[in-house]
Amino acid sequence: ILLGVDWSGGRVDVEGVTVHPHRENCWSVCVSNCTNTHFKNVNIVATRCPSSDGLDIGNTSNSTFENMFIHSGDDAIAIKGAQSGDPAKTMPNKNLRFRYIQTWNDCNNGLGLGAETNCYYSDIRFDDCYVLFNYDDGWNHNKLSERGAMNICSLNSTYFDNITFEDIYVYRTERLIGMCFIDDFYFGSIKGDMSGSGAITNIKFKNIFSPYRADSSVANNMNYSAWTSNPVKPIHDILFWNLAIEGNQILDYTTGYNTY
C-alpha cells in the first residue's frame, strides 16, 4: 500500500498529490476504516497488472473524493468491506461522494463496489464522472460476468441501498452495468459467504451516456445476478432514467420487486 489513511476521528484532507507506484500486486491508494476524509485534485497512475487498483475505499463513511484522475491496471475505484465478522456489525461504507473523476482501468471495474463486501453499503453517489476506458480482463476477455464500468459485486451476504450513478459519460467499455451476488471471485481465488441475508436495492442510474461500442460480445451490456438459493438475496427497485447507449435511449424504467 503506497498511501494509507487509517483515522477514526477528526478530518483528513489530501490535496494536490500525484501517486505513481509502478508496481504490480499493490493497491495504490487506500482509505481504510475512516470517517471525514476528503480527497481533492489527486492523480493516480498505476498501470502494471495485476491487482494495481487505483483508489480502494474500505469500511469508510462521510467522505468525499473530487477532481481526480485515475489510470489503473486493475480497478480504478473499488469500495470494499474487508473487516471480519458479521457484516451488520462491521464499519459500513456509508455517505460517500465521488464527483468530477476521470477513470481509465485496464482490467476489472471503473466505478466499482466489491468484491470483498463484509459490511453494509448505503448512501453512495457518483456524480459527473468520466469512464474513459474500461476493460474486463486481459487474460480472460469476455469470460467474467462480475465486472463493468459501473458495478456492484458482492461476495458476502450484505445489503446495498441507495447507490446512485448520475451524469456518467462512458467513452469506451466492455460491460456497462453489473450487479451480482457470487460466492467466489476470479475462478475461486477469493471465497465469499452467502449464508446470511442480503439485497441490492434502490439503485439509480441517471443520465448515463455510452455512445460508442467496443468490439466485444459484452460491450455496453447489463448483467444482473441475484442469489436464488436459500437465503435468497434479491435485486430490486432499480431505476434507469435517461440512458443513451449507442444512440438508443431509455427515458424512464424502474424494475419491480425481486428482479432475479
Image (spheres, helix red, strand yellow):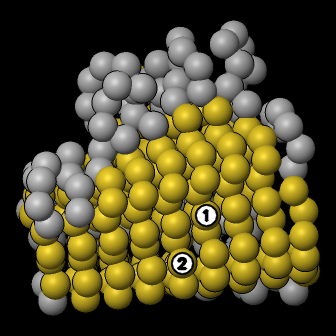
- Residue 46: x and y in percent read 24, 71
Q: Residue at x 47, y 19 (%)?
A: 193
Q: Residue at x 38, y 67 (%)?
A: 76
Side of 78 relative to 20 (left or right): right
Q: Residues within 10 Å of mark 1 (few under 14, many from 20)?
A: some
Q: Is residue 166 left or right of residue 41?
A: right
Q: Identify the secondary structure beneath mark 1.
A: strand
- Check whether the beta carbons of the residues at disc 2 and disc 1 lie within 8 A of each other: yes
Q: What amino acid does circle 2 point to?
A: Asp
Residue 141 higher or lower than 18, as above or below: above
Q: Where's the C terminus, which quadrant?
A: top right
Separation (CA) of disc 2 from disc 1: 8 Å
Residue 89: quarter of image: top left
In what quadrant of the picture does the N terminus appear? Answer: bottom left
Spot occupied by residue 105 in the image (x, y as percentages of width and height): 42, 70
* Residue 78 visible here: yes
User: Disc 2 on helix, strand or loop?
Assistant: strand
Residue labelled with disc 2:
127
